[in-house]
Image (cartoon, rainbow, N blue to C red):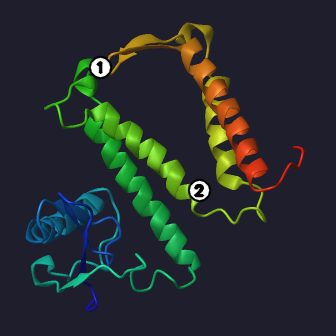
């Protein structure tokens, strides 16, 4: 894959991002442009090794030497070469295989941690493992929502997240009652149930306000 490159982007005042789109998933950050690029070269090797260890074919990437990859600025659009072309069926299958391997590696990494280890923050400015995992879960939903062709499609991601929550509670037994402290706040099963309903109704009203401000007072179906 001779067209493989590292693309860099200044993410803010204090960090840079570097990605290798030729191997989807290989990315890194750094406090300087040079550090981000160096970290991306390391990340390419580490991610390729992780996928291979999980049974994903790395044939496409085995001949790429990340140390020799040229560097370019990220396109203003944020789209990398080839990302605006239609998908082929095998590419969806390849993504699913890679996604399964990546998630299995993540779960294997954290599975043996105790509740205390999940909550502990190494420093005041670093996340705990739990915070990182919760961020991954919420980001997955946010990314999926970018696929929606609203209003033409029937809100697939919104319905899918509903099914996840519904399934989670469908398999719950009374003995599964939860009562524990997470990041200094006490959570029980009842509190989670209440907050889910409160949050949805809160934003139901919020969306009605937005629609009214736009001049749409259409009653819900």
Taking depth in this image into account, of 74 and 21 the one nearest to the observer is 74
Seen at 52% across and 68% down, the residue is 93
Write the residue at 59% across / 23% down. 195
**Residue on which the image places disc 2:** 145
Question: Is 107 situated above or below 115?
Answer: below
Q: Is residue 38 above or below residue 145?
A: below
Mark nearer the N terminus (1 vs 2): 1
- Compared with 112, 132 (above or below) is below
Q: Is residue 181 left or right of residue 48?
A: right
Q: Residues within 10 Å of mark 2 (few under 14, many from 20)?
A: some
Disc 1 secondary structure class: helix
Q: Quadrant of residue 166?
A: top right
Residue 113 at least partly seen: no
Q: Is residue 111 left or right of residue 189?
A: left
Q: Which label number is shown at residue 181?
A: none
Where disc 2 sits, the SS reads helix
Residue denoted by label 1: 115
């Amino acid at each position: 894959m001779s067209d493989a490159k590292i693309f860099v982007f200044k993410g803010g005042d204090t960090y840079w991002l570097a990605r290798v789109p030729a191997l989807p998933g290989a990315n890194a950050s750094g406090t300087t442009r040079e550090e981000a690029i160096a970290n991306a070269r390391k990340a390419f090797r580490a991610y390729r090794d992780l996928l291979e260890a999980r049974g994903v074919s790395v044939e496409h990437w085995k001949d790429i030497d990340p140390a020799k990859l040229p560097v370019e600025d990220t396109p203003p659009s944020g789209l990398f070469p080839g990302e605006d072309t239609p998908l082929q069926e095998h590419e969806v299958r390849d993504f699913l295989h890679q996604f399964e391997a990546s998630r299995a590696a993540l779960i294997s990494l954290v599975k043996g941690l105790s509740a205390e280890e999940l909550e502990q923050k190494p420093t005041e400015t670093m996340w705990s493992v739990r915070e990182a995992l919760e961020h991954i879960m919420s980001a997955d939903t946010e990314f999926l929502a970018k696929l929606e062709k609203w209003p033409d499609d029937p809100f697939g991601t919104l319905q899918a997240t509903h099914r996840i929550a519904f399934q989670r509670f469908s398999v719950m037994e009374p003995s599964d009652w939860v009562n524990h402290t997470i990041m200094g706040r006490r959570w029980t099963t009842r509190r989670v149930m209440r907050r889910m309903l409160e949050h949805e109704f809160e934003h139901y009203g919020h969306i009605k306000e937005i629609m009214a401000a736009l001049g749409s007072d259409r009653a819900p179906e």
